Amino acid sequence: DTEVTQTPKHLVMGMTNKKSLKCEQHMGHRAMYWYKQKAKKPPELMFVYSYEKLSINESVPSRFSPECPNSSLLNLHLHALQPEDSALYLCASSPQGRRGTDTQYFGPGTRLTVL
Amino acid sequence: AQSVTQLGSHVSVSEGALVLLRCNYSSSVPPYLFWYVQYPNQGLQLLLKYTSAATLVKGINGFEAEFKKSETSFHLTKPSAHMSDAAEYFCAVSSGGSNYKLTFGKGTLLTVNP
């Protein structure tokens, strides 16, 4: 099973709402990632968890809060977002996150719209 | 810092024609290189990757890429385009080391005309 699942597929939220994105993998991977992708652009790395510890935070605003409850799950908590945060949010996982040769497996994404 | 440059934001080919998508990299250390494909409203799927084992890499769906160190290139090819190949293609380079980061090119949109 090489699948990364993400829920929900679509999310519409107001600027005062609190919501969460969820990502799950059952491949035994020890690294998980959040990316943000705007239309017609490449994915931009936001966070990396390696062995359930946050190893990279790409200077993401605090209104985005990641959480890795266990090695299979990754959440992204959203609060007080801005309309410019509307994008496709992609989750990915890789076997270790410590080897440049590791393949990242991507989920289908959550399409977020902030009103 | 490592980076990739994809030449041509949009490539259009006829069905059955050769597909050539260009990628040049910049790296101070031996790079690991990847090609991903993204279909509309979907995530990214790995087509192939170069990890220094062989310079000619074969991937899924009939795609292949050749690593040329002298030209710092990793171009993606397919002998005969199919309508189902229409998608966005991203070249990416890995930073390696203890914190694995994937740096993407800007992408090339491939359209296939009947």
Image (cartoon, coloured by chain):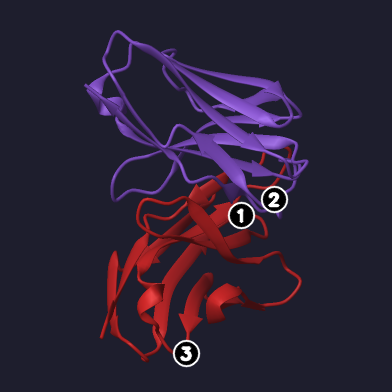
Asked if A12 appears above or below A81 in the picture, the reply is below
- Quarter in which the C terminus of chain A is drawn: top left
According to the picture, the residue beneath numbered tag 1 turns out to be: B28
Residue B50 as seen in the image, left or right of residue A30 = left
Tags 2 and 1 touching, CB below 8 Å: no
Kind of element beneath mark 1? loop
Who is closer to the viewer here, B70 or B105?
B105
Drawn colour of chain B? red
Query: x, y (%) of residue A30?
Result: 75, 36
- Please give the name of the residue rendered at 36% of the width and 91% of the height, measured from the top-left corner: B17
Vertical placement of B106 versus A38: above or below? Answer: below
Amino acid type of the residue that numbered disc 1 sits on in the rendered structure: Ser
Q: Residues within 10 Å of mark 2 (few under 14, many from 20)?
A: many
> What is the chain identity of the residue bearing mark 3?
B
For the question of whether residue A51 can be seen, the reply is: yes
The colour of chain A is purple
**Residue occupied by mark 2:** A100
Spot occupied by residue A90 in the image (x, y as percentages of width and height): 48, 39
Query: In the rendered image, which residue does mark 3 sit on?
Result: B79
Which is closer to the viewer, label 2 or label 1?
Answer: 2
Give yes or no for contact between labels 1 and 3 (Cβ–Cβ under 8 Å).
no
Asked which secondary structure carries label 2, the reply is loop
Q: Chain of mark 2?
A: A
On the same chain: label 3 and label 2?
A: no
The percent position of residue A41, horizontal first and vertical second, equals 33, 48
Residue type beneath disc 3: Pro
